[in-house]
Image (cartoon, coloured by chain):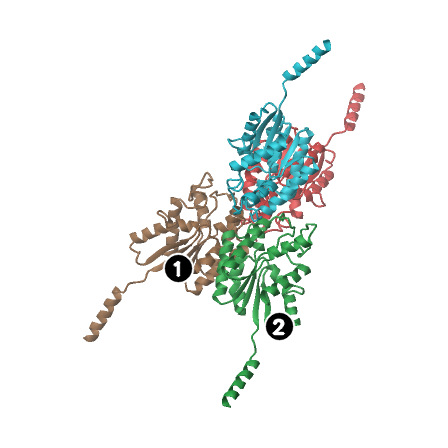
Chain colours: A cyan, B green, C brown, D red
Amino acid sequence: MKKIILLATIFALCSFKPQKPVNVVFFGDSITEYAVQPNGFIALLQQRLKDEHKDADYMVSGAGIGGNKIYDLYLRYEDDVLVRNPDVVVIWVGVNDVWHKRLAGTGTDYDKFGRFYTALIKKFQARKIKLVLCTPACIGEKTDYSNELDGDLNKYSQCIRDLAKQYNCGLVDFRSLFHAYGLNNNPQNKDNGILTKDGVHLNDEGNKFAATLMYKAVIN
Amino acid sequence: MKKIILLATIFALCSFKPQKPVNVVFFGDSITEYAVQPNGFIALLQQRLKDEHKDADYMVSGAGIGGNKIYDLYLRYEDDVLVRNPDVVVIWVGVNDVWHKRLAGTGTDYDKFGRFYTALIKKFQARKIKLVLCTPACIGEKTDYSNELDGDLNKYSQCIRDLAKQYNCGLVDFRSLFHAYGLNNNPQNKDNGILTKDGVHLNDEGNKFAATLMYKAVIN
Amino acid sequence: MKKIILLATIFALCSFKPQKPVNVVFFGDSITEYAVQPNGFIALLQQRLKDEHKDADYMVSGAGIGGNKIYDLYLRYEDDVLVRNPDVVVIWVGVNDVWHKRLAGTGTDYDKFGRFYTALIKKFQARKIKLVLCTPACIGEKTDYSNELDGDLNKYSQCIRDLAKQYNCGLVDFRSLFHAYGLNNNPQNKDNGILTKDGVHLNDEGNKFAATLMYKAVIN
Amino acid sequence: MKKIILLATIFALCSFKPQKPVNVVFFGDSITEYAVQPNGFIALLQQRLKDEHKDADYMVSGAGIGGNKIYDLYLRYEDDVLVRNPDVVVIWVGVNDVWHKRLAGTGTDYDKFGRFYTALIKKFQARKIKLVLCTPACIGEKTDYSNELDGDLNKYSQCIRDLAKQYNCGLVDFRSLFHAYGLNNNPQNKDNGILTKDGVHLNDEGNKFAATLMYKAVIN
């Protein structure tokens, strides 16, 4: 009898014991910055967690700043991410590292991209934070690899895939997934308007697509 | 009787009348400049014409200058090509228009590439010169479109294909042909050493490959 | 008697014979393109010629296109300038040759800038057209040579000064004149708002300044 | 008598008491990397300290890596500098931040240059390390501000001067000092060969000049 009471008490305590939600921080550039706006993929994730009554289990937030490259993330990971004490960090960066070579002469050398990315991974993993890495989706949505920066984006994406494998991180390979999506949904080989507004930043369809992929990578 | 003698004379004159060889000028950048050296594709063409006893029918020469972009060709087409009074001009340009964006900040804007190329075509066609256009082969020989400048090269190559069609020119689509060759012969996805020495300039294999393609396009 | 009448008639005819005005074409980039708008320096010149009753003696017009570099002028000098049969051509170019290195990776190599400029000078001088060359004024109006592109602008300006001397052309050295003006009128070392709206394109003050200098160079 | 013995003992103790030398680390790019080689300015400093019997008082070492920009220093300040437990750090960086815009499209945005520099200063000052900041000397030694990158170098140098003032650091203003030296010693306006071998890297004269300035700033 005593035993039963004890067990009951334990169950009761457990069910009341406040479960700390898994804290997920999305860390990146303007794509992540915009994702917290209505219809952004982080907002969509939050809504879905609510709809599925998982919002007590997962807490998701964004730490994106427009124009950020890998070294900008390295500069601010303490102030903007570690302070939130995350369990999972999703890193989505790379577009500006490639794009700004053309835009402003201030992109990121390939070797240094890998070096800073590695350093960032190590800093998070030293804190037992789980990581999900994302490849840059696109700069231009043409599917025949005739977007001006396709070559460099493919190169940097491969670096991220390799790092994910080497450091045992999750991976959302947006680069491949966007390309596959385009092959099916962009028969006119358009430069934008499929998953992005402007070739880079997600439109509503792109945000839904990203939300589904992020959910799979982070929540399940 | 008189008539017969006359005819005979005419035939005799015709058969002695020296046949002017078809004058082919290769017009381009360093790839064309090197092509006149031993084992270069122009030297190989000259040897083959000799071997096949066609050297009285075709005269081939090179007018390549290292670092040339489309507008450099436009600046010197009179002094370096028209003066040779060619029947056929083979234009092979585009690598530097893309590459120098990265190397020196002095590549060629996409729209201006098309504008100068069109102007050059018109100048030659106004002189009844037959044209063969060539797409740029590669800057890096990786076959998965992860060479840094693949996207831009694909874009500029498409421009050349469109111009060849629009202005009824011959086309040697090196871009596609090199890629196809690489898929069959570069299983390790190497950056160079397949058809080029350094990712751009032809090695012996590349010169043989180019000579065969040029022969087909120009000599028949 | 008859002779006298004849002479008188000749004199009368001569005095009525319409004097062909000196035809001045301003050839350049956006700065020249905007100059034909109200308050632009070409519009100001036209007004001044009218006010001084010299509009029968001089005809001034603009042939500026935004974004033009030296080789763009070379491409269109026949269609846009020679067709107007000018007596004097004022060439004002150079800003984009330097600026586009940073903006788009498509500036003009220093040696090619000189080469195209020389070719253009020769084409005009072969037609007995008088030339006035202008140095690029500024990209940023700070006076301590801390505008990002000051070094390159100074370098290209020197090239133009040398060409003006070598080919015996007129020169309006906007680069030096704007700097001198700034030393006197820009005590706060501002980036724009002195003679330009945005560091490059002339404001009202800049157009007045340019009109005065152009008048001195071309009309007097 | 006792007193004398006591004093003698004190003197003896003092002279044996090991004085920890002031530990100075030079932190920078290739200019600093080469400075430890024979005739490099760090080697010259070491020799001079020895000659003046101050080598027990000061310890100087180099932590330069070729191609480094401000964010590279930020990435490695712990591993390469803090581990040496320095009392003084001399930061000399900036050439590549400007130069690589042109060389590789991977320079450093002006605002981010300031942001990383500030972060680095704070990290060192939090450890009570004294700082001496240096402005980049030159990319090209012409004295009329017609070296291609003079404008940008002047701009970034001013940023460093402002930071030195704001954070109360020492300053060696190589930018101004090299320019002043050139005005006196480079009458032909040469591009290199005055204080540098190639416009950037110090020759023997440049290393002597730098050693003297560094001595004044660090050793007194």
**Which residue shows up at 33% across the image and 57% down it?**
C58
Chain letter of disc 2 in the image? B
Residue A153: x percent and y percent? 60, 44
- Above or below residue C60? Residue D176 is above
Q: Residue furthest top?
A: A1
- Say what secondary structure mark 1 lies in: strand
**Disc 1 vs disc 2: which is toward the camera?**
2
Can you identify the residue that label 1 sits on?
C88
A8 or A163, nearer to the observer: A8
Chain letter of disc 1 in the image? C
**Which residue shows up at 71% across the image and 45% down it?**
D37
**Which residue shows up at 50% across the image and 88% down it?**
B3
Q: Residue furthest bottom?
A: B1
Residue B127: x percent and y percent? 48, 67
- Say what secondary structure mark 2 lies in: loop
Quadrant of the image for the N terminus of chain A?
A: top right
Residue C173: x percent and y percent? 45, 52
Count of picture labels: 2
Residue B93, by quadrant, is bottom right
Give the amino acid type for the residue marked by disc 2 in the picture. Answer: Asp
C-alpha span from label 1 to label 2: 51 Å
Give the amino acid type for the residue marked by disc 1 in the picture. Answer: Val
Q: Is residue C24 visible?
A: yes
Q: Is residue D180 visible?
A: no
10 Å crowding of disc 1: few (<14), some (14-19), many (20+): some
Can you identify the residue that label 2 sits on?
B55
